[in-house]
């Protein structure tokens, strides 16, 4: 299921509705730790990389930190696919490449 905005109050409903996955998890509106705590491994989670700052004008270190934080928040127990919360023309190709590289380096379960 694709979502936009803060869907925290709908998490129980989304799980009960029979979806296999939840995509977007738009930061900073959605707390990834809360999502993982409430959903656990009931759904595959995807997203949580900020497309307003991190993938537009962040430094390489900031992109790597965002990737690490997303994996730390939602990677435990598997079921997490890191990705941008969405795509738009202002996104930096360089930042996207940094996100992919960081995911390859830090995206092995379990990650501490």
Image (spheres, rainbow, N blue to C red):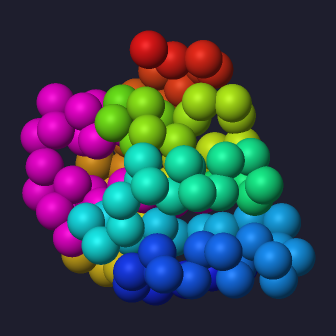
Nearer-the-camera pick, 40 or 4: 40
Q: Position of residue 18 (x, y in %)?
A: 88, 76
Quarter the C terminus occupies: top left
Q: Does the magenta segment cover residue 62?
A: yes
Q: Which residues are magenta?
A: 46-67
Residue 51 position (above or below residue 64): below
Q: In the figure, residue 107 lies in which quadrant? A: top right
- The tally of labels here is 0
Name the image quarter holding the N terminus.
bottom right
Query: Is residue 28 visible to the viewer in this orientation of the structure?
Result: yes
> Can you say whether 3 is above or below 60 in the image?
below
Q: Between residue 64 and residue 14, name the one nearer to us.
A: 14
Q: Is residue 57 left or right of residue 54?
A: left
In the displayed structure, does residue 103 sit left or right of residue 77? left
Q: Position of residue 81 (x, y in %)?
A: 62, 47
Q: Nearer the viewer, residue 59 or 68?
A: 68
| Quarter of the rendering containing residue 14 | bottom right
Which sits in the foreground, 100 or 37? 37
Residue 4 image point, x, y percent? 46, 85
The magenta stretch spans residue 80: no
Q: Residue at x 81, y 77 (%)?
A: 16
The picture quadrant where one finds residue 31 is bottom left
- As drawn, is 38 to the left or to the right of 71? right
- Residue at 60% across / 74% down in the picture? 11
Would you say residue 87 is visible in this rendering? no
Residue 6: percent from left, percent from top: 39, 80
């Amino acid at each position: 299921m694709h979502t936009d905005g803060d869907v925290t109050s709908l998490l129980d409903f989304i799980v009960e509705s029979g979806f296999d996955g939840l995509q977007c998890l738009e930061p900073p509106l959605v707390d990834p730790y809360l999502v993982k705590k409430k959903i656990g491994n009931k759904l595959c989670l995807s997203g949580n990389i900020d497309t307003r700052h991190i993938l537009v004008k962040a430094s390489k270190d900031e992109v790597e930190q965002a990737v690490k934080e997303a994996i730390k928040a939602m990677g435990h127990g598997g079921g997490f696919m890191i990705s941008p919360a969405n795509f738009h023309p202002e996104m930096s190709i360089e930042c996207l490449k940094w996100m992919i590289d960081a995911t390859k380096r830090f995206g092995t379960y379990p990650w501490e």
